[in-house]
Image: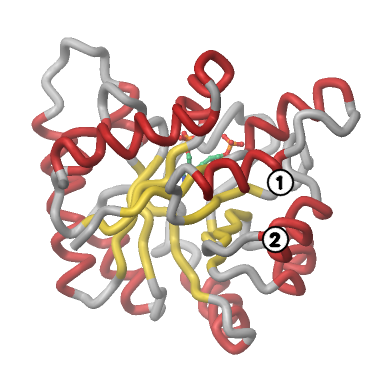
Amino acid sequence: MNLRLGVNIDHVATLRQARGGHEPEPVAAALLAQSAGAHGITVHLRSDRRHIQDRDLRVLKDVLAIPLNVECAATPEALEAVVPVRPSWITLVPESREELTTQGGLDAIFLQGMLRPVMRELRSAGIRVSLFVDPVLDQVKMAAKLEADAVELNTGIYSDLPMDSDATLELGRIRDAARLGSRLGLRVLAGHGLDLHNVGPIAAIPEIEELNIGHSLIGRAVLVGLERSVEEMLAAMAETRP
Ligand SMILES: CC(=O)[C@@H](O)[C@H](O)COP(=O)(O)O
Ligand SMILES: NCC(=O)COP(=O)(O)O
């Protein structure tokens, strides 16, 4: 199975919002990522609208030829903004206003009563649903029980490990969760904090179909250009998953 790259363009919008103007245009970034070989575009519509705006979703949906994945909290306010856009995917993520970035996976077990009707509504609107969960077997089982189309395994703990530390344990958790998700019929994605240096061992996990990568890729794009940054990431992924 070929490994796909979803490019998260949130932080192009972060830069735009720093001045509250029009530049840089995240839609232009999405189109450049698409032409450089990205297989999908991911954006996170945060409740505080710190980067991606409602208008971005609408324009992205209109212009992209590759799937649009919108991450959001499972709140009525977020879903009212996202569902009418009809993205290919909605990924439900936990969110708190104070966090700098997502702090962990969704607790699908604790939230199952709330998630069940929400996910049913999204499915009936023709939108595929992914749950961003920690690499914990019971969370993956619950995602399957809730009839999610996919799980995105949170690689945040793995990505935060110091460079010279032993990642065996965390990689094992991600590998086991990926294997279980695939066995249960879920599509398995992974992401959070991945970069050119740590992506290899995650890309090597055969059950993982797609990686969502944003911050490091956009950070590098500031230095070398977005197309080159996407191409470098695709090449790094292909080193372990040709
Ligand atoms: C859910 C996840 O891991 C990321 O998409 C992250 O939430 C992106 O949001 P920020 O770009 O606001 O950190
Ligand atoms: N869901 C993960 C994502 O979209 C990108 O996360 P990051 O690479 O910005 O940490």
Toward the front, the furthest residue is 35
Q: Is residue 89 above or below residue 175?
A: below
Q: Position of residue 205 (x, y in %)?
A: 15, 49
Check disc 1 and give the amino acid type: Val
Toward the bottom, the furthest residue is 124
Q: Is residue 71 above or below residue 215?
A: below
In percent of the image, x 31 and y 60: which residue is there?
139
Q: Is residue 215 above or below residue 205?
A: above
Note whether ligand 2 is within 8 Å of mark 2.
no
Residue 236 lies in what quarter of the image? top left
From the viewer's perspective, tell me whether residue 176 is left or right of residue 120. left
Say which quadrant the N terminus sits in.
bottom left
Note whether ligand 1 is within 8 Å of mark 1.
no
Mark 1 surroundings within 10 Å by alpha-carbon count, few (fewer than 14), some (14 through 19), many (20 or more): some
Q: Are marks 2 and 1 in contact (CB under 8 Å)?
A: yes
From the viewer's perspective, tell me whether residue 141 is left or right of residue 35. left
Check disc 2 and give the amino acid type: Val
Residue 52 lies in what quarter of the image? top right
Q: Position of residue 158 (x, y in %)?
A: 27, 31
Mark 2 vs 1, N-terminal side: 1
In percent of the image, x 53 and y 62: which residue is there?
66
Q: Position of residue 81 (x, y in %)?
A: 78, 63
Q: Position of residue 30 (x, y in %)?
A: 61, 45
Mark 2 surroundings within 10 Å by alpha-carbon count, few (fewer than 14), some (14 through 19), many (20 or more): few
Q: Which residue does the numbered mark 1 point to in the structure image?
A: 27
| Residue 155, label in figure | none
| Residue 63, label in figure | 2
Q: Is residue 47 above or below residue 22?
A: below
Toward the top, the furthest residue is 164
